[in-house]
Image (cartoon, rainbow, N blue to C red):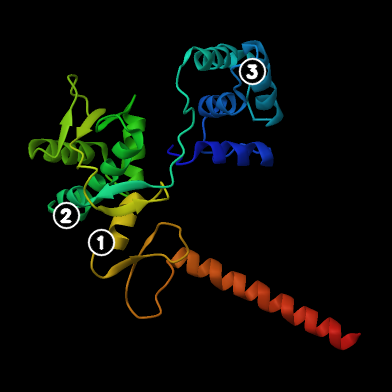
Amino acid sequence: MYILNEKEYIREILVSGNKPDNISNGYLITLIAKYYFDRGKDPNILIDTVKAKMLEFNIEGYQEYRYANKIKKTCIDLYDSESKNLFRELEYVPIYEKELKVVESLPNDRQKKFMFTLFAIARYMNSEGWINKKDSRGLSEVFKLANVTLSSDKRNELLHELYSNGYIHFGKKVNNLNIKIDLGDTDDDVAYKVTQFENIGNQYIGNFKKGYKQCANGCGRKIKIKGTNDKYCKYCAREKQLEWQRNSMRKSRETSMCEVS
């Protein structure tokens, strides 16, 4: 999961009192600990606060004792850390002109979408171009983010092609989980700003492939331009139609009530 502004994100979660389905308990614990961290207070106060906040969410299947060590370690690590920037607070993730040229040099849309996504993730991670995943599930999330649907064998083929042609590099242990890319110079012009970390592959197609554009509703899906009135993907178009129908029915009822009175 990639969150551009972690502080704003956790603040909204705490206010709502609802845990989003797409955030793990471990990551939620980390964000809560960072949010309530105060170096001037006893670490045990922070530990108790995190425990209490986690219980307030009433998470199905959550058992405090299973996360006790995780909570304690997370809190203690904050006190041991000298970093002042606890949260990642980004307005956007930049893709630079040189990086875009690398993407556009690739032979097909799958590779282009995947490479564009790798640049976005690498910039987000800020680890000198490294994108490290613990297991194949983490790598699957990268392909999903890139809007590239392939079998496991086909994924490996795509990675091998990019590796063989020098677009990506692997770590010492070649298991496709530790990938490094060559980032462009930050003095270069910014070609694109990723402000939503979802459907990044489609963002590339919608902004840079001729004949396509992004859905005007901001969902991140791409749409093929067939006419001047094409604005929304089929899903958002349906939602807009339903919204229009609901508003129309509401206005009709209000008019009828006024006539009766």
Which label number is shown at residue 104?
2
Q: Position of residue 46 (x, y in %)?
A: 64, 18
| Relative height, residue 133 to residue 106 (above, below) | above
Q: Tell me whether circle 2 and circle 3 mark residues in contact (CB < 8 Å).
A: no
Considering only order in the chain, which callout, 3 or 1, is on the residue closer to the N terminus?
3
- Which of 87/169 is in front? 87
**Left/right of residue 137 with respect to residue 73 in the rendered view:** left
**Which residue in the protein does label 1 denote?**
208
| Relative height, residue 8 to residue 133 (above, below) | below
Amino acid found under the numbered disc labelled 1: Phe
Q: Residue at x 25, y 61 (%)?
A: 208
Of the two numbered discs 1 and 3 in the rendering, the one whose residue sits closer to the viewer: 3
Q: What is the distance, in whole Å, between disc 2 and disc 3 at their CAs?
A: 48 Å
Task: Looking at this view, name the residue that lies furthest to the right.
Answer: 261
Q: Quadrant of residue 247?
A: bottom right
Amino acid found under the numbered disc labelled 2: Glu
Q: What is the distance, in whole Å, between disc 1 and disc 3 at their CAs?
A: 47 Å
**Which residue in the protein does label 3 denote?**
46
Q: Secondary structure at mark 3?
A: helix
Quadrant that contains the N terminus = top left
